[in-house]
Every structure is written in structure tokens, then in C-alpha cells.
Amino acid sequence: MSKTKRSAPRGRGEGRRKSRRALVAIGLVLAIAAAAAVIRARAPGPPDAGSAATSLAVGATSAPAVALAGDTGFGGLTGRWLRPDGGYVLEIRGVDPGGAIDAVYLNPRPIAIARAEATREASTTRIFVELRAPGYPGSTYTLTYDRERDQLSGVYFQAALARSFDVVFVRMP
């Protein structure tokens, strides 16, 4: 009695390859869409639905919105700031009129920022940054912008050590 091997029908293996190709193509499309969403979120663009400019178009009075947008005093904060004692970099990409800061913190690799905001008290501009990453959970910077010296100074609270340090950031060229 001879032994014969049974082979799969010809179309079956090809069908698996096609479905794998389809899954890979779908994964690739999803990855590209996710990357595009991240790039779009980081790129400056038209104002959001809740912004002052959109409120003007919807019929809000223009005087308060224009005053808010023009008088935030946060314009001097944008840029790259270096903490000379450790080489840490705080890059402030923008500050919206409400004080929300779009920022990146580098040590030298990016460290996740949970919250970043700017506030004004009379002529004083303050910045608060909360980090959220392994080794940094809940660590914060509470800084004041010195317009004359063009620097940020204040306190860094290192949550893992439960210690505070006086720090200064200088603007990078």
C-alpha cells in the first residue's frame, strides 16, 4: 500500500495569504491615519470651535474676545528654555488665551506632561507644569517669567524624592 500525502487545495493557501495582506494593509492604513492625527494635533491650525475667534463669528460681542486674545501676555513664553544645571529643556510651542500651554519636556528624551498652564496675576506671569512618566509621577515645575531677564525661575518639586529645588530656565537661541 502506498502512502500519499494529502495536500491542501490550491486556492486555500492563497486565500490565507490574501487575508494576511489585507490585514497588513488595514494595519498600515490605521498607522498612517494615527500618525496624521498626531501631526494635525501638533500643527497650528484654524481656531477650535470654542476659541475667541469662533465666538466672534457666532455672534458674541467682539470687545471682550478681542481684549482676551490680545491681552493674554503669554506671547513671551513661547520658545525653547534650558535648565543649565541639568540640561533639561522645556519647549513651549504655544499658549492659548485661556492659559493652556502646548509644551514638550526633554531629559534628553521627551517626558510626558500631564498638565501645563500659564496664569497672570497683575503683571506677573506664572507657569505650572506637571510631569507624568516613570520616575516623574506628579513632579511639578512652578515658575515665574521674568520679562527683564527673559528667564523662567521657580521651584521644581521632585515627587519621587518629595523634595523641592530652586531652578532657572534660560531661553535657548
Image (cartoon, rainbow, N blue to C red):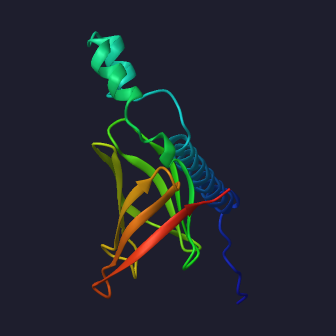
69, above or below 107, in the image: above
Query: In front: 2, or 16?
Result: 16
Q: Going by the picture, which residue comes out furthest to the front?
A: 148
In which quadrant is the C terminus drawn?
A: bottom right
Rendered image quadrant of residue 160: bottom left
Q: Nearer the viewer, residue 82 or 42?
A: 82
Q: What is the quadrant of residue 122 in the picture?
A: top left
* Foreground pick, 143 / 39: 143
Give the number of marks.
0
* Residue 77 point in image, percent of width and height: 48, 48
How far across and how far down the image is residue 139, in percent? 34, 74
Q: Is residue 153 left or right of residue 4?
A: left
Image coords of residue 56 (percent x, y): 34, 14
Q: Is residue 124 above or below residue 58?
A: below
Q: Position of residue 5 (x, y in %)?
A: 69, 80
Which residue, as the protein is rendered here, is positioned at the far top?
59
Q: Is residue 151 above or below residue 166?
A: above
Quadrant in which the N terminus appears: bottom right
Judging depth in this view, the residue of 103 and 151 nearest the camera is: 151
Please tell me which residue is depicted at 40% across the width and 79% down the height of the picture. Answer: 134
For residue 28, side relative to residue 54 (left or right): right
Residue located at (57% from left, 45% from top) = 39
